Amino acid sequence: MTRRPEHLLILLGVAATLGFSVWQALLNNYAIEVAAFTGREIGILQSLREVPGFLAFTTVFVLLIIREQAFALVAVALLGLGVALTGFLPTEYGLYFTTVLMSTGFHYFYTVQQSLTLQWIEKERAPEVMGRLSAASSVAALLAFGTVWLGMSRFGFDYRLLYLLAGTAVVVLALFAAIAFPRFPQAVPQRKHLLMRRRYWLFYALTFMSGARRQIFIVFAGFLMVEKFGFSAANIALLFLINHVINTWAAPRIGRLIGRFGERPMLTLEYSGLILIFTAYAFVENASVAVLLYLLDHVLFAMAIAIRTYFQKIADPADMAATAGVSFTINHVAAVIIPVLFGLLWLHSPAAVFLSGTAMAAVSLTLSRRVPSSPCEGNEVRSFQPKAPAH
């Protein structure tokens, strides 16, 4: 088999997803049952988890001493180490520590993955390849959630063993990738300093709002299932498994739809759907309806590929690495704050948390209408100024 750059990206994406998915599937039950977490502690943990994402801009400084490809390998191995240690530190501060360790590898990897994808994959193929990356990650998530569900419900695996198995598998896959793949060249040398360009403002705004509203889904949708509807760890793993079965089928097709219809229509569809879904979350009283909302929620989030392909079309090719780090930081500005503040709000009104997500989706919808039909350098933002009347 030809060892192409996209194959390396897929393998590392699979490894990272495998480790994170096991961590995520077990987290809420592990935190509640073992570490006795309430909404306050889970909010603090999720905010701490996002701190490495907030610091993703430092990627550009790391790249002064290590190549992006090597940095991706190191980051995935670090993610695996954090996951492997989680079951051995079953206390509030132990869970905070292993979460930050795992998250450091997770966020640095996805920062570099985004940069390398935009550099290595041609613009015409980018939406479809990104869809394939998402689908491959969903297959890895299926394996992870299936292992958790079978391990806990059929074989009596405990949290420690599952975390150790998952973390070790991630480290092994990172070592295999380091040995099996050659060093791929970079077509365009990347700028090794921080930069923000005025003409990228819409990309920055869409990225910021994406990070803000996504926290509502990541932190509180799963927590709702456990706290309000009493889902067990095996139930949550099964829900995630079904979720990723759907995404494995849907993500490549969503990528092709973005390539066919463009970024603006797909983002408009995503945000319109999220307005309805977040509003429904606020008032749901039936577990089956909540599950349906969760599945629809995740399918719509796959359309966020369009934000990255929009940037690829408008950006200077030399800006990919530096902007990837800055965009991850922008994405996580709200993510560092929202879990703590909304964790406190959750204690008083879970519905208010989800209605805040509705408002965020509405802002994103407004911004998405500014994406041009044919974005490119020099045509970054759609203008709504009326044309002068003909004389």
Image (tube, rainbow, N blue to C red):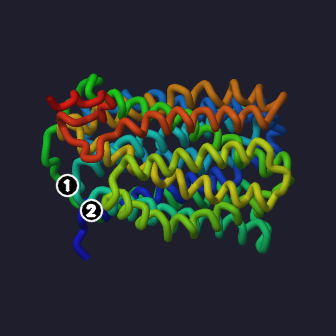
Mark 1 residue element: loop
- Pointer 1 with pointer 2, Cβ within 8 A: yes
Rendered residue at 77%/62% (across/down): 235
Please give left or right for residue 387 compared with residue 16 in the image: left
Crowding near pointer 2: few (<14 within 10 Å), some, many (20+)?
few
Which residue corresponds to mark 1? 184
Q: Quadrant of the N terminus?
A: bottom left
- Residue type at tag 1: Phe
Picture coordinates of residue 132, whole percent (x, y): 39, 64
Picture coordinates of residue 46, whole percent (x, y): 64, 35
Q: Is residue 176 above or below residue 320?
A: below
Please give left or right for residue 153 compared with residue 194 in the image: right
State how many labels appear: 2
Residue 272 in sight in this render:
yes
Give the label on residue 181, or none: 2
Residue 195 in sight in this render:
no
Give the label on residue 234, or none: none
Picture coordinates of residue 242, whole percent (x, y): 64, 67
Mark 2 residue element: loop
Query: Camera-side residue: 175 or 246?
Result: 246
| Cα distance between the residues tagged 1 and 2 | 8 Å
Picture coordinates of residue 364, whole percent (x, y): 50, 36
Query: Camera-side residue: 42 or 211?
Result: 211
Crowding near pointer 1: few (<14 within 10 Å), some, many (20+)?
few
Please give left or right for residue 121 compared with residue 300 in the image: left
Q: Quadrant of the C terminus?
A: top left
Rendered residue at 47%/31% (across/down): 208
In this view, the residue farthest toward the front is 391
- Residue type at tag 2: Phe
